[in-house]
Amino acid sequence: MYSPSIGVTSTPATAYGNRLFVYEVAGLNQNTDNDSLDYPIRRSGSVFITVPYQRMNQEMRRINRMGGRIVSIKPLNADTPLQVTSNQPKSQVVEQPQSNTQKTSKSMTETKEKAKIPVNIYKPKNPYIGKCIDNYPLVAEGGSGIVQHLTFDISGGDLHYLEGQSIGIVPPGTDENGKPHKLRLYSIASTRHGDNVDDKTVSLCVRQLEYEHPETKETVYGVCSTYLCHLEKGADVAITGPVGKEMLLPDDEDAKIIMLATGTGIAPFRAFLWRMFKEQHEDYKFKGLAWLIFGIPYTANILYKDDLEKMEADYSENFRLTTAISREQKNKDGGRMYIQHRVAEHAAELWAMLQEPKTHLYMCGLKGMESGIEEGLSPFAKEQGVEWKDFVKTLKKEHRWHVEVY
């Protein structure tokens, strides 16, 4: 721990991995989680904790468990003592070690060269006819809307895919003009091996679209989503694709994956997390950090809740779950808690992670997410002297910014 009245010195660190960082933490309380620490926890003000680079993620999670909030993260300068004159500085600067310029992030296409990204194996004029083998609800009692997890048998064809891709569904029947319905795209919610890990299935997470007609005021139901949500086991379904290269999961086992989702936008991230933690592979053993920030209206709408909570408990060093429950939680201003408010709360941590070349940020869900994330992070970026839009351009250039909204 560091006291504001004490200067800090350290042995010079020459390697990136040996760097030390100082966390300024507010809001810690003495409790059973930290009674064993060798320093007292104050009930107000800030504490200063020195953390080796290798333990930054573990320390972030430990602080979070103790109810603390990271105010700033600064590298410990071996030559100049850390000078802190106030527990509540007006502007905090989060710095990160300069990355090796020779080690640039590879594009998703380069990353997936070996996998040979499959695209449009089945087209709308000649779709694959799969069979529904599972269709169960994901919303618990007290939640809003209808959301279903569907699994289709694809063993009779050559449909294969990667995590982060989508498939098209062609609903039966015709539209008001007598023409066949157009296909709708849905993010795949299963890994490339399917929920049964036998390479014979593909799964979706589908919410029944329901809205009020602006003129007639009648309730309108989405054609394809209603068809899927009420699809019976054993029914045939026309599938196209797969499509998409933007949301692919990098092969790097040490990557840091920030996932921002609203509602059924969790679908591709379910695929990511199942591959990382539920499946066991000889050629892929995830050792990095996956952080899911999930926005939903009610606790009952936390899709795949039991699985997510079990993964967080079993893999606490590698997986972190943060929820924004809009109808049950309040933000700091007393309004509803949305995903951008959680992003703002954790801005220092997220910003520090995004400085690392192995960190990828993904977002999937309703349109407007990008502006919400900008709302959450741009004020913090500005404090660091960085224009958020310029920073996003850099992330896009480095193929570390992945967005799929609808």
Image: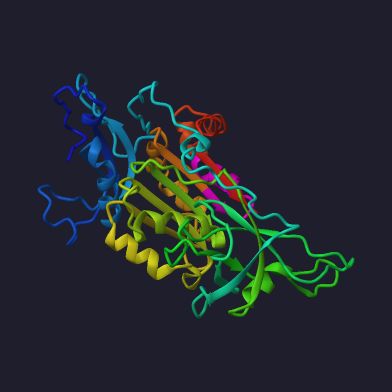
Residue 222 visible? The answer is no
Residue found 58% across the figure and 57% down from its top: 159
Closer to us: 194 or 206: 194
Taking the image as drawn, is residue 277 in sight?
Answer: yes
Q: For this rendering, which residue is in front, 279 or 34?
A: 279
Q: How is the image coloured?
A: rainbow
Q: Which residues are magenta?
A: 363-377
From the viewer's perspective, is 283 left or right of 369? left
Q: Please provide percent x and percent y for residue 133.
A: 54, 75
Residue 17: horizontal and vertical position, in percent? 24, 31
Q: Residue at x 51, y 38 (%)?
A: 108
Asked whether 55 or 114 is in front, the reply is 114
- x and y percent of residue 267 in the render? 52, 59
In magenta segment, residue 375: yes
| Quarter residue 185 falls in | bottom right
Please identify the dominant SS of the magenta region.
helix
> Residue reaching furthest right?
177
Is residue 209 located in the magenta-colored stretch of the structure?
A: no
